[in-house]
Image: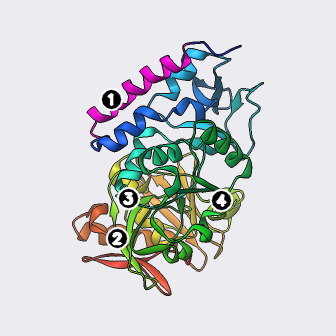
Amino acid sequence: MMMPADLETDAARLREAMAKALAEDGVLADPGWRAAVETAPRHAFVPGFYLPADGRDGQGLTVWEPVTAEVDYGRWLAAAYSDTTLITQFDGDEPDWKAPQVRHGGAPTSSSTLPSLVVRMWADADVQEGHTVLEIGTGTGYSTALACERLGSADVTSIEVDSHRLEQAASALYGCGYTPTLAVADGLYGYWPEAKFDRIVAACSFRAVPPALLAQARPGGKILLTLSGWLYGYARVLLTVDGNGTAEGHLLGGTVSFMSARMHAAPVFGNPAHWAAGLPETGRAARHSPERITAATKEAFHLRFLAQSAVPDAQMTAVGETVHLVDVVTGSAATLTPVEGRWEVHQGGPVRLWKRIERVLAAYDEAGQPGPETFTLHVYDGGQHLRHRHLPGLPLPRP
């Protein structure tokens, strides 16, 4: 199928409508970013993507439908200019968009982030004209295009660990007239050839702040990244670098999550039942419900990150009503099971996982349940600590 002759007209109209909607939502207060959104052709960066079907399959898995201009032009273009994250890859497997297949389940490994979040990231990093920026995670290249519109291509460097992803992004960027510096590189190590940068913005998440990024930021430069971990707790932080190998900054509000840098992804931990079988038969009443860190609320989102800082090597999964915590590093495990209106915890191994989390939850309550913006991350030679004036410091994993 050939593209309709009025594609560019349709796209321009939808771009303008998207920019107007984002401005009304308060996302595009800066006229420079609004102009970038009205100009950068997102559809050129997402020739194909997946959208979830209305129902799940017989095994309870999400059914992902491929969407391309050839399959459904209207749906493809409307989605390209919606404020939606578009999944472009699962499990590291690059789709054949000329003959795309429906997928059942799978772990997304690349996407085009929703435009409001892309603009929010650039704006939160205080990116201004004249800044040189490093973007970690080129992805489809759309966010790179927005930066090029705002700053000019010469001041933009973008790196991507997936060579095939970068090849496609480069083709789209150059085809649209953008010429940033692009490279296949691991975000953990930044990109020394173009350092130093005024701003570093990561579109993936890290367990701790990579030291190379501090070294590649100018004194007074800022780094915006998402911290995450194996409990899938997330927090965004804007760090200011002092030039002496240290940095600090406050956590930012909101509930933003990004895919992990591939070297920071959680390891496979096996069968939860095997771990549970080795736990003591005698348990105790849990002082806090696991729902405090699993509920679909902003507070639980924040608490999961704090809990994760106390047990950085733990992972969590639910089987039926039982919540399992597994730590493959120390060999520790815990289960929480509802029993007669309360939760019963069984723990084993050198680290009492739920006991550590309970301490954090208790301290959080005693401190008046402070929000993310009241926490400061300090990064210095030898460590990284999350601090609050009314709470004990929480260390991040060694980077």
- Residue at the spot of label 1: 21
Which quadrant holds the C terminus? bottom right
Give the percent coordinates (x, y) of residue 397. 53, 75
Circle nearer the N terminus (1, 3): 1
**Label annotation for residue 49:** none
Label 1 with label 2: CB-CB less than 8 Å: no
Q: Secondary structure at mark 3?
A: loop
Comparing 134 with 288, the one in front is 134
Three-letter amino acid code of the residue under disc 3? Ala
Circle nearer the N terminus (3, 4): 3
Label 3 with label 2: CB-CB less than 8 Å: no
Residue at (58% x, 61% y) in the render: 315
Circle nearer the N terminus (4, 1): 1
User: Do we see residue 129 in this rendering?
Assistant: yes
- Residue at the spot of label 3: 125
Label 4 with label 2: CB-CB less than 8 Å: no
Comparing 80 with 266, the one in front is 80
Q: Residues within 10 Å of mark 4 (few under 14, many from 20)?
A: some
Q: Residues within 10 Å of mark 2 (few under 14, many from 20)?
A: many
Q: Is residue 36 above or below residue 281?
A: above
**Label annotation for residue 249:** 2
Q: Secondary structure at mark 2?
A: strand
The magenta segment is: 6-26
Of discs 3 and 2, which sits in the foreground? 3
Three-letter amino acid code of the residue under disc 1? Ala
Q: Main secondary structure of the magenta part?
A: helix
Marks 4 and 1, how far apart at CA: 34 Å
Residue 153 lies in the magenta stretch: no
Of discs 3 and 4, which sits in the foreground? 3
